[in-house]
Amino acid sequence: MELLVAVLSSGVLNGLVYALVGLAFVLIYRVDGVVNLAIGECAMLGALLGVHLHNDVGLPLIVAFGGVVLLGSSIGVFTEVGILRRMRRRDPLRILILTFGLALVLHSIARLIWSTDLYSLPTFPAVPNVIRLGVGRAVLPGQFVWIAALAFFVFVAWGAILRRTHLGRDLRAVSDDREVAEAMGIRASRKVLGAYIAACALGAIAGFFVSPVLFMTYAGGTLLGVKGLIAALVGGLLRPMGALVGGLVLGIAEAATAGYYRADFKDVTVFGILIVILLLRPQGILPTAEAA
C-alpha cells in the first residue's frame, strides 16, 4: 500500500509538470500549427533565472517570478516576430529545424552563464518542505501544492478563455482558417503572437515552479521539453485538456515502472506509450469531439 501511494503521488507530481509544458506546445500548435521545440529551453531558463534572481541577487520570489515571465514572453516574441514571421515559405520541416536551432542556441547561452552546476529554489512559502501522506514513510514535496495550484489555475483559466470570451472565439477562428478569420476582421498575426508569448511564458513559469523539486542544469530543459511534447501528443496536440491527460498518463506510467520494476526503464515506458498511441490513435487518446 505504501508503495502504491508513493507511485501515485510521484506520478501525479511529474504528470502535472509534463502537462504544463505540454500545454505550452498545444497553445502554439492549436493556433499556428507549429511545434516549437524551444519550449523545454524556456522551462530551463525560467528555472535558472528564477534561482539567480532569488538566491544570488536576493530579490523576493514574486519579483523573480516577474522576471521569469518577462524572459519567457521575450523568447516568445523573438521566436514569432524575429524568426518565423520572416519566413517566406512556412514549410513545417524548416520551422521544426529553426525552432530546434533556437533551442540549441538557448541551451548554449545557459551553459555559458550557469556552467554545468545544479541549481534549485527553496520550497515556496505557505507549505511545508515535506507532506507526509499518512501511509508508512510515503512523503510528497510540499512544492506539489504550488504546482497543483498552478496547473489547476492554468487549465481552468484557459478553458474559460476559449469558451467564454471573444478572444477565445478569435483564437478558434484563426486556428480553423486563418485567411477566413482575417477576412472577418480578426488580426490573426496578433493572435498568433499572443499564443507564442503565452506558451513561452508558461514554459518559463513551469520551470520556475518545478525548480524546488528538480535540480536544474543548462541541460535540464531538453528532457523536460521532450516529455511535455510526448504528453501533448498522447493527449492530442489540438486539445489543451489532452496535455493534462497525457501528462498524468506519462507521469503515473513512469512512476509505476520505476517503483515496480526498474527506474532506468521508465523512459522506455514513456516512449513505448508514445509509439503505441501514434500507431493506434494518432489524434490522441481523448475523443475527437473534445472542444478546443
Image (cartoon, rainbow, N blue to C red):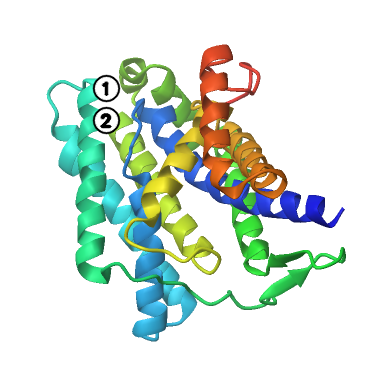
Which residue is drawn at the image coordinates 74% and 49% (left, top)?
Answer: 8
Q: Amino acid at mark 1?
A: Pro
- Name the foreground residue: 219 vs 228: 219
Q: Crowdedness of circle 2 by 10 Å Cα count: few (<14), some, many (20+)?
A: some
Residue 62 vertical position relative to residue 286 in the rendered view, above or below: below
* Location of residue 82 (image quadrant): top left
Does residue 251 lie above or below 283 as drawn? below
Looking at the image, which residue is at 39% across and 56% down? 220
Residue at the bottom extreme? 58
Instruction: Identify residue for label 1.
Output: 92
Q: Percent from the top left, x then y, of residue 49?
A: 35, 69
Identify the residue under disc 2.
Answer: 96
Residue in the foreground of this view, choosing between 228 and 125: 228
Question: Pointer 1: residues within 10 angstroms few (<14), some, or many (20+)?
Answer: few
Q: Residue at x 53, y 27 (%)?
A: 274
SS type, badge 1: helix
Foreground pick, 286 / 121: 121
Q: Are marks 2 and 1 in contact (CB under 8 Å)?
A: yes
Residue 28: x and y in percent read 39, 35
Q: In the rendered image, which quarter contains the C terminus?
A: top right
Left or right: 72, with 212 as reference point: left
For the question of whether residue 166 can be seen, the reply is no
